[in-house]
Image: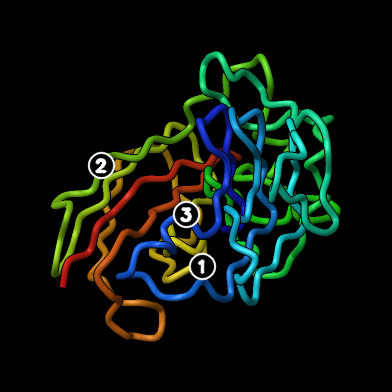
């Protein structure tokens, strides 16, 4: 569990919840890092009464609402306090410029992009949580200009090739890339200066080295005009 945001759930991160079921093997080599775990009802992070978990690493998490219940843990290099989300009422879990999550995360195993497709890190270091604060794009209380738009790819799911349509309202540098669920770049489809207009790109399910990608979910990230838009793609082999 790396660079996620958990807020206002019944439970937080519960490690070993189903290990008592016979079909499941022992719990080993679990990493919980760079997560915002905030105001979940019963606890934030717990070992779930399993002292025999081996290879458990818990570090660099921002914990908001620690209750010190039995087996509730903080881990090392944790940050305590309000993560300062933009607006939980409207489900905007971007972080404010004053958030204690900024620059407090670990680079170890951190994804290359955040939930918006913005590159990690920004400025001094990696942020904790799903959002990497970018002073150029994370503008609180203002609307970003609609300088680009990304349409749903078609077909989706796909097996051989899928079409990706996007539109630019202003000229500028454009980057269209595919990422896997770990935030690692798979292939760059477009990286050049383009003028206003409608454009089409396609992806055949092959990475930058010419290897076929495995079945699963991928993300298409369009970055143009200081803005990033991300869409989901499902590849079926």
| Residue carrying label 2 | 152
Callout 1–callout 2 Cβ contact below 8 Å: no
Q: Describe the element under mark 1 as helix, strand or loop.
A: loop
Q: Describe the element under mark 2 as helix, strand or loop.
A: loop
Residue 30: percent from left, percent from top: 58, 68
| Residue carrying label 3 | 17
Spatial CA span between label 1 and label 3: 29 Å
In the image, residue 161 above or below residue 49: below
| Residue carrying label 1 | 184
Tell me what residue is drawn at x 80 percent, y 33 percent: 99
Of badges 1 and 3, nearer the viewer stands: 3
Drawn side of residue 160 relative to residue 215, left or right: left
Tell me what residue is drawn at x 25 percent, y 42 percent: 152
Drawn side of residue 222 relative to residue 200, left or right: right
Looking at marks 1 and 3 on the same chain, the residue that comes earlier in the sequence is marked by 3
Looking at marks 3 and 2 on the same chain, the residue that comes earlier in the sequence is marked by 3
Mark 3, other Cα within 10 Å: few <14 / some 14–19 / many ≥20: some
Mark 1, other Cα within 10 Å: few <14 / some 14–19 / many ≥20: some
């Amino acid at each position: 569990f790396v660079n996620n945001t958990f807020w206002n759930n019944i439970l937080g991160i519960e490690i070993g919840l189903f290990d008592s079921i016979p079909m499941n093997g022992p719990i080993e080599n679990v990493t919980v890092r760079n997560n915002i775990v905030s105001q979940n009802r019963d606890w934030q992070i717990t070992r779930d009464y399993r002292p025999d978990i081996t290879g458990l690493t818990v570090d660099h998490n921002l914990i908001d609402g620690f209750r010190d219940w039995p087996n509730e843990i903080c881990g090392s290099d944790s940050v305590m306090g309000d993560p300062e989300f933009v607006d939980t009422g409207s489900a905007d879990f971007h972080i404010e410029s004053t958030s204690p999550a900024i620059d407090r995360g670990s680079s170890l195993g951190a994804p290359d992009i955040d939930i918006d497709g913005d590159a990690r890190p920004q400025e001094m270091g990696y942020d904790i949580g799903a959002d990497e604060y970018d002073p150029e794009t994370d503008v609180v209380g203002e609307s970003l200009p609609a300088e680009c738009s990304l349409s749903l790819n078609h077909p989706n799911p796909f097996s051989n090739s899928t079409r990706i349509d996007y539109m630019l309202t202003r000229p500028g540098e454009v980057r269209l890339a595919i990422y896997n669920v770990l935030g690692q770049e798979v292939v760059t489809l477009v990286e050049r200066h383009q003028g206003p207009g409608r454009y089409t790109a396609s992806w055949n399910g092959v990475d930058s080295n010419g290897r076929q990608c495995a079945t699963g979910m991928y993300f298409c990230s369009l970055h143009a005009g200081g803005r990033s838009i991300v869409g989901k793609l499902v590849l079926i082999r």
